[in-house]
Amino acid sequence: MHRAPTLLHWVIAGVVVSLAGVGYDVARAMPQRTLPDAMRHVTRHITRPSAPARASAGTRAATAVQAAVLLQLNDCSGNLRMLHVLHRGSTRRHIQLAVIWYVGPDADSTHIRAALPSWTGTIPLRAAPPAVVQQFASLGHTTTPALLVLDQDGRVRFTTQSPRSSREVAGLRRIIEGLTWIEEL
């Protein structure tokens, strides 16, 4: 004899489905273990630039590397020098800004996007996961904005705070250009 499902059966089925949905959401929202992992998680849809043709042995060739910026709404009132550095001259060919993370309420994202330079319009703007903020802090960056640059193998190569003077801006440009040169085998 076939019995109709009781209210208890429906409640149990609802709880099971809800728990499965919660488990799925938790798995998707789990913080990434490293800064490069967090960048890859956000930028999976961005294709990496193709590597240049092999240069002759003993020479160097430039390859674009990935970078990320961590900032907050207060930074947008004049402390975005590093974004200008990333977009000037040859630096723009050497480095690809993959994501802009922000610290603050979700409502800040609209104001931040409006204050960013127009060339950043296609760069993903995402709330910084707590793990990302903690990793920046563990590297000594407890204020924003901060810049993260990966090497050609996707490892953390360089982090810094925004330059405070024209001399620091020039130094940052030289550092970034130096990081993008690799020895060819």
Image (cartoon, rainbow, N blue to C red):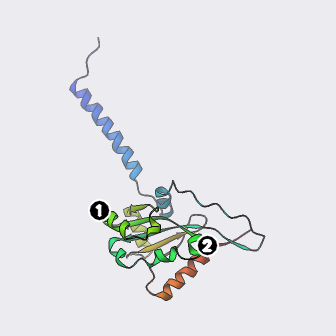
Q: Is residue 25 visible?
A: yes
SS of the residue under disc 2: loop
Tag 2 near tag 1, CB within 8 Å: no
Give the residue displayed 40% in from the left and 61% down from the top: 126
Answer above or below: position of 171 versus 69. Answer: below
Q: Residue furthest left?
A: 7
Label 2 vs label 1, nearer the camera: 1
Q: Is residue 81 left or right of residue 111?
A: right
How would you rate the neighbour count of disc 1 (Cα within 10 Å): few for under 14, some for 14-19, many for 20 or more? Answer: few
Residue topped by disc 2 = 180
Residue 98, x across and y down, in percent = 50, 63
Residue 18, x across and y down, in percent = 31, 39
Give the residue displayed 23% in from the left and 23% down from the top: 6
Numbered circle sitting on residue 107:
1
- Quarter placement of the C terminus: bottom right
Residue 67, x across and y down, in percent = 51, 68
Q: Is residue 53 left or right of residue 170?
A: right
Tell me which amino acid carries mark 1.
Answer: Ala
Question: Nearest the camera: 165 or 137?
Answer: 165
How would you rate the neighbour count of disc 2 (Cα within 10 Å): few for under 14, some for 14-19, many for 20 or more? Answer: many
Give the residue displayed 37% in from the left and 63% down from the top: 130
